[in-house]
Image (tube, rainbow, N blue to C red):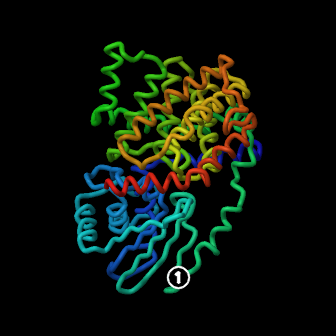
Amino acid sequence: MTGRNSELLEILKKEVVPAVGCTEPVAVAYSVAFAKKQVSGELQSIEITVDPGLYKNGLRVGIPGIAERGLHFAAALGYVIGSPEKKLEILNDISPLSIKKAHEIIQQGNVNVKIKKGFDRLYIETILTTTEDRVRVITLDRHLNIVNVDKSEAEKDFETEYMSLNLVPKAIQKYHLSDFIKFADEVSIDELAFLKDGLKMNLEMAQAGLDNTSTGKNLLKLIEKGLISDDMISRAQFLCSTASEARMAGIRKPVMSSAGSGNHGITVFLTNAAVAEKRNIPEEKLLRALALSNLVTAYIKSYTGTLSAMCGCGVAAGIGASAGVAYMLGGTEEQILGAMINMVGSISGIVCDGGKEGCAYKLALSSGWAIEAALLALSGSVVNTEDGILASDFKKLFQNLGYICNPGMVATNDAILEIMMESH
C-alpha cells in the first residue's frame, strides 16, 4: 500500500468507529469519566460548560436503554461509570445501580451545565471538584479530543492558549476526490472488514427500530398500500429513518459512526446498503463505496465543523452517501462530483435543531435524495455550478459550504437554541 493510501486508511479507521447513544451526551459522559480518573476524594460538584451546538444536540436526546435524557444525566452517569477507556461506547452498559447513583448526584444538586455563548466550535469544559482535588478538563473540536487537563486553581485564558489550534491544517484537506476514488479502488478488501461490521451494526439498529418505533412500521404500510414505491429510494429511507429513530429514542445498541456522528454513520452505511440490496451489488463493491462515502463525509466535516446550524446528515453524510451510490453504480469521477453538486445545490441549509427522534425524517429526506442526486448525475443532469454557493472544483465546493456554516449560520444556531430552550 502506498504512503498516501496508508494515511487515508488510517483516517478512515479513525473516523469510522462504533458508538452507543447520541455522541453529544456520550462526549460529556466521557469528559467527566476522564476527569474522575484524575482525582480522589468524595464528589462535591461537576461543572460542565459546552458550546451552543453541543448543548442543542444533547438537550432532548435519549440515553441508551433508560428513560432519562439530556446532558445533566449524562454527566452524572459519566462520573458513576468512570470508564473513559470505553470511549464512544461508555454508555453501553448502564446498570440499575448506576441509574440510582446518577439520580442521587442530580438530586443533591452536584451537576451544573452551562453554555459557552458565542463559541462556534465543539467545546466541553468539565470542572470536577472533590473533597481532596479539583481538575479542569477541556475537549475541543472532536467529541473525545481532550486538549487540556489542569489541576491548578487558576483559570487559564483558554482562547489565547488553544484558538491557534484551528490554524493547523486538517490532514484530510490535502486530498482530492480523485485520491479518495483511487483509494476505494485499490485498498485491500481485507482492510475494509470493519466496514462490514458497521453494516451489520447499523442494519441491526434498523431492525430494532422496526420492533420498537413507529416510523419504520408506517413507511412499510405506505409501501404495502402502494402509496410509496418499493424501490431503492424508499428502502434507504426506511432503513435510515428507522435506525435513527431507534438510536435517538435510546435503544441500547451500537452503531458504526462516521465523522463523529452515529446518525451520519446510519445515513452513509444504510443508504449505500439499500442500493446494493435492490441492485444486487457485490459486497466488495459496496464496501469500496462505503470507504469513499466515509472519506468524503469526513472531508466535508473538516470544513463545516463537527457541529453546525446545518443538519450534517444532509450536508455531510447525505453528500458522502451520494458519492458512494454514484461510485457503486459505475459513475466516473465527474459524475460522482456531479452527484455531490446536486446535493449541495438542493438540500444545503436544512437546519439542525438538536438530536431527537425527529431526526429520522431528516435522514429519510437525505438518504432518498442522495440516491436521486446520484441517478440524475449519472444521467447527465447536474445543477449549474455558477448557481448560488456552488463551484465546479471539489475543494472550493466544500469550502463554500463550510463558510455558509461558519460564520454564515452562527446566528441561526443561536436562534434555534433560543427557541428550543424557551420550549424545554
* Residue positioned 72% across, 38% down in the render: 394
For image coordinates 69% across by 32% down, the residue present is 387
Q: Quadrant of the N terminus?
A: top right
Residue 370's x, y, as percent? 55, 29
In the current view of this chain or complex, which residue is farthest to the top? 226
Query: In the displayed structure, does residue 241 sit left or right of residue 150?
Result: left
Count of marks, rendered view: 1
Residue at coordinates 56% horizontally, 20% vertically from top-left?
A: 281
Report x, y in % for residue 97. Answer: 23, 63
Mark 1, residue position: 155
User: Left of 329 or right of it: where is 7?
Assistant: right
Crowding at dot 1, Cα within 10 Å, few <14 / some 14-19 / many 20+, comes out as few
Q: From the viewer's side, name the closer residue of 235 and 182.
A: 235
| Residue 328 seen in the current view | yes
Identify the residue shown where x is 39% and y is 53%.
419
155 relative to 114 in the view: left or right: right
Locate the C terminus by quadrant: bottom left
Q: Quadrant of residue 216?
A: top left
- Residue 296: % across, % down: 63, 40
Give the residue type at disc 1: Glu
Q: Nearer the viewer, residue 266 or 423?
A: 423
Q: Is residue 231 above or below residue 157?
A: above
Instruction: Determine the secondary structure under disc 1.
Output: loop
Which is more toward the observer, 202 or 374?
A: 374
Q: Is residue 85 above or below residue 158?
A: above
Q: Quadrant of residue 36?
A: bottom left
Query: Does the image show residue 14?
Result: no
**Percent x, y of residue 242:** 37, 33
**Vertical comparison of 312 with 106: above or below:** above
